Image: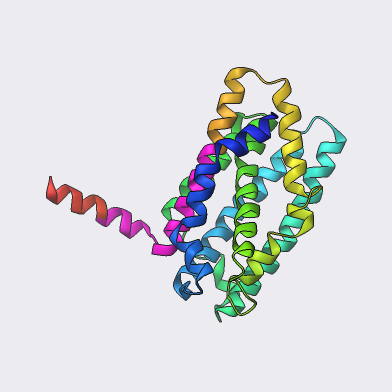
Amino acid sequence: MSFSQSLIQQEQPLLQANEQCSFIQDVVHGRLSREAMNYYIQQDLHYTDAETYVQTQLIAKSASIADQRLFTDQLQSHLQTVNELYESLSKTLHADWSLQRKQTIQPVTSFYREHLLSQTRDGDLLDMLTPFQAGIWMYVELGRYLASTGKVKPDNGFYQWVVDVQEPTLAGPDGISARFFAVMDREAESASEVQLKRARDNFHRSCLFEWYFWDAASRQLTWNDFENQALQASTMA
């Protein structure tokens, strides 16, 4: 079994948890609120900004021209498709696109971004790529799941998201997700057990953060909510 196959096998419980989370189930049943979807768009734009930086570092730390081209091509696609998708989703909500990126970075987004960005400081290619690819893999699998339900129709506000994450260039046999897994497998061959454990942990934590990201969107979780919970706990002590 390859390293990437072992990661996929390891994360099946969290994949199922993501599929059954309230946000995804609300998409399936056509009851996703405008507030939850708008929060998701705003926060994922902040997260994708972190992804942009990670991809620049993957290019910079690549030891081969082939890897540099792979990561450069994906970065160019990322910069185009993210804006197009979220501008389209914002229009379905009649939200002002010019304001979407200007919203506060909320708690779970902040923690998830730091999880990604921390690997760019001292990590190697495997360290940086593994937690990043976990998010891509989770999106591809959630897109497949949502499509398989047969319930997410063109009149569903999240329909375009489902279509986009199933694009062959992302999710196909030779798509970017498969190609990133191939790079991870190659790098894993020369990695130490310590490095492999760290990569496994980072992949796992990204899958866990994905669940918390959807959950935060469902509840529109803010820093005020975090503070209020802490203050309420202190009064009960």
- Left or right for 86, reference 26: right
- Quadrant for residue 86, please give it: bottom right
Q: Residue furthest right?
A: 65
Image quarter hosting the N terminus: top right
- Main SS, magenta region, reads helix
In the image, residue 53 sits, relative to residue 22, either above or below, namely above
Residue 33 spot, x, y in % from top left: 45, 74
User: Which residue occupies 57% across, 37% down?
Assistant: 203
User: Which residue occupies 64% across, 18% down?
Assistant: 192
Residue 133 spot, x, y in % from top left: 65, 43
User: Which residue occupies 70% across, 29% down?
Assistant: 2
Q: Magenta span has 207?
A: yes
Image quarter hosting the C terminus: top left
Q: Nearer the viewer, residue 85 or 207?
A: 207
* Chain part drawn in magenta: 204-228
User: Can I make out residue 32 in this image?
Assistant: yes
